[in-house]
Amino acid sequence: MALTDLTVHELQALLRTREISSRELTLAFLKRIADTDKHIGAFITTCEKTALENADRADARLSAGNAAPLTGIPLALKDIFITEDIRTTCASQILDNFIPPYNGTAVRKLMEQEAVLLGKLNMDEFAMGSSNENSAFGTVKNPWNRECVPGGSSGGSAAAVAARQAGATLGTDTGGSIRQPASHCGVVGLKPTYGRVSRYGVVAYASSLDQVGPVARDVEDCAIMLGAVAGYDPADSTSINLPVPDYQAALKQGVKGLKIGLPKEYFIEGLDADIQQTIDKAINTLRELGAETVEVSLPHTEYAVACYYLIATAEASSNLARYDGVRYGKRMDDGRGLIDMYMKSRAAGFGPEVKRRIMLGTYALSSGYYDAYYLKAQKVRTLIRQDFLDAFNHVDVILTPVAPTPAFRIGEKTADPLQMYLSDIFTIPVNLAGTCGLSVPCGFSRDGLPIGMQLIGRPFGEETILQSAYAYEQATEWHRHSAPL
Ligand code: GLN
């Protein structure tokens, strides 16, 4: 087995006993990226030089015997994370030459552990999309079938893990952007509770929904990554001051006696047959492991997508106002005045989906429509959150599909934005409710594409969903399958 095939927890052991060095491991991953990324396109930027510097520092720390969990582990980050002296594009033309002067909090935490940063990963522009087709740096290909999308918006983060180009990665999830690509690429992805991980130094899309989270080879790696980045941060006023549990230690508690809710609104007619069968089997496995399943209802589910596309676009239209060609990013100026420079810079810098969202959001916030759209959506959001809180009075975990279909073909949905928006129908409610959810591999479609199941937990109940996913994973073989690349 190649070093790049191993999980973070396996690599940890090899590094600590000094059987391998971080430099050796880093070189193996850099070679793997060089050999495979022409087929996948997961990376926007690779940073060989800094990666090897990180690795040498990690080796010194490993030799001194005071390693942190991620010391010496090669990782990669969605290109939405601000990284000091390393280009950060958000997959947009408007930031194609932006080199930030600082690290965001999650990145700083990884660097303090002496993790190795291999590079920055492709994504949908400003995290707007479900297929990675909205990138100014090319579409990412699904490592399981290169004619298919990897999902989005953290498509590079999921594809890189599936292609064994990084030990693990970080993504962000505003409406499904970690869980949906994780499901499509056959890896584990977790969206923590809103406020669990600092958003400081993460380019904002929809600030009341955005959350940072890990994508990893298996559940244990996911727990290690979450533990490394979670926690209160005074620099993010929405981060919550709660202690960070030992997620890895919580994994082995099993699911015996756990109550799992199956929301009837999510198991609807018209669900893809492969998804239905795979999820049904997974439910049975969890029952065999001792979990009890009960039907629950999340009655406002049908309004979630509409509600999300009002709130997310409204917040995006405001957040993206800062890209004006003045302070950073692309500037198109032919001397015809300030307004002309703004318009030309934004017209040239933003792609079509980003422009569509800015227009939708600006409309929803405009006087006369604010009450009818934005305010109404905020009220519906409260009802959706209440649905989840009510359900969690009766169950410990809620289980659903992650996406209504397996990965679709590149180009299949680009002409129909509504179809594209509907691919997040099962993940969006979790963001609106502000709670946590993960995707864990649970089988394959007839065409050999991976399928994930979603486990949703109470606010700050990450331990319970990780423990459930771990019990399921240990009882099954899905995480041992590797993309044919
Ligand atoms: N696909 C959804 C959107 O386009 C979610 C994206 C995300 O979670 N960043 O908004």
Image (cartoon, helix red, strand yellow):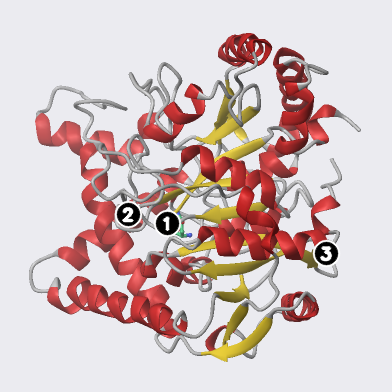
How many numbered marks does the figure carry?
3
Q: Quadrant of the C terminus?
A: top right
**Circle nearer the N terminus (1, 2):** 1
Q: Image point 27% across, 50% down: which residue? A: 238
Most foreground residue, 474 or 268: 474
Q: Label 1: which residue? A: 174
Q: CA distance from mark 3 to mark 2?
A: 37 Å
Q: Amino acid at mark 1?
A: Thr
Task: Give the quarter of the image for residue 22.
Answer: top right
Q: CA distance from mark 3 to mark 1?
A: 31 Å
Q: CA distance from mark 1 to mark 2?
A: 7 Å
Looking at the image, residue 120 lies above or below residue 242: above
Q: Position of residue 300 (x, y in %)?
A: 39, 85
Q: Position of residue 483 (x, y in %)?
A: 82, 47
Please indicate, yes or no, whether residue 137 appears anywhere in the rendered image: yes
Q: Position of residue 333 (x, y in %)?
A: 21, 24
**Circle nearer the N terminus (3, 1):** 1
| Marking on residue 475 | 3
Q: Amino acid at mark 3?
A: Ala
Q: Is the CB–ligand 1 distance for label 2 below 8 Å?
A: yes
Q: Quadrant of the N terminus?
A: top right
Ligand 1 quarter of the rendering: bottom left
